[in-house]
Image: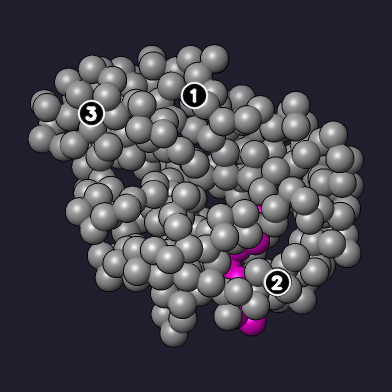
Amino acid sequence: MTDLTLNDGRTIPAIGFGTYQVPPEDAARLSREALDAGYRLVDTAAFYGNEAGVGEATAGTDAFVTTKLWRDDMGFDATLRAFDASLAKLGRDSVDLFLIHWPMPSHGLYVETWRALVRLRDEKRAISIGVSNFSPDHLDRIVDATGVVPALNQIELHPNFQQRAARAAHERLGIVTQSWSPLGQGRTIADPVIGEIAARTGATPAQVILAWHLQAGLGVIPKASSRARIDENLAAQHITLSAEDIATIDAMDDADGRLGPNPDTL
């Protein structure tokens, strides 16, 4: 399985198991099935309400575990308290990667929140630190304020919304880009362009899309609710798209293709 190198010298699996909207009662079972299938990264968040299940599944393993700070817990001291609560639910002394879930610029707290993450990293309780849904302006501000560059930015990214400006900023700063909703919340799977490539390559539409991410050097964290879909998604790492196929998917980009909230206006 391919790994991506973080700017702190560590590596992170390029494909991970995402648990957004995985019910708490299913999180341990599905996360365990993902690990059994060969995943080495499980992504959760305080907001998902399933950290305890992820912690149960990953206990005693060498799985790379990511969790995130919810937007209601921003601010220096509140961040430290929320981090302790997440660790308790996960049943861990440390977490591999801790992210600020949303910058929430209207709150004016993301710089001091980032300072709290730097402290947690220095204490070796958050081994790597990063952000989610940060725009290039947000990134520049926290780097200018602290001198610490996030290891990773997890952003909405799929063929219909390719975030080229954000990816260019990440390249400039040495930040790994990790895609959430990599399949466009299922909508892109039904696109006939993707279907044609899938039929020609013998892959499924989801595998085509995930392979496009992986060949672009992006991390992905697709969610799956069955073992069959878990296996299908993981097998995308063995699919190789032609330059023509990649160019065809690149041409699907839409400036208005965002499906989730705009982090600049929250």
Residue named by callout 1: 161
Residue extent of the magenta highlight: 92-99
The circle on residue 181 is none
On the image, the x and y values in percent for residue 128 come to 64, 64
Where on the picture, by quarter, is residue 154? top right
Q: Of the residues under marks 3 and 2, which one precedes in the sequence?
A: 2
Distance (Cα) linking label 1 and label 2: 34 Å
Name the residue nearer the viewer: 212 or 159.
Answer: 159
Question: Which numbered mark, 3 or 2, is in the foreground of this view?
Answer: 2
The vertical placement of 103 against 23, above or below, is above
> Which residue is nearer to you in this view: 232 or 4?
232
Quote the CA–CA distance across marks 1 and 3.
21 Å
> Looking at the rendering, which quadrant does residue 144 occupy?
top right
**Residue 16 visible in the current orientation:** no
Secondary element type, mark 2: helix
- Position of residue 158 in the picture relative to residue 100 (left or right): left
From the image, tell me which residue sits under label 3: 242
Q: Label 2, on which residue?
A: 85
Instruction: Specify the amino acid type for callout 3.
Output: Ser
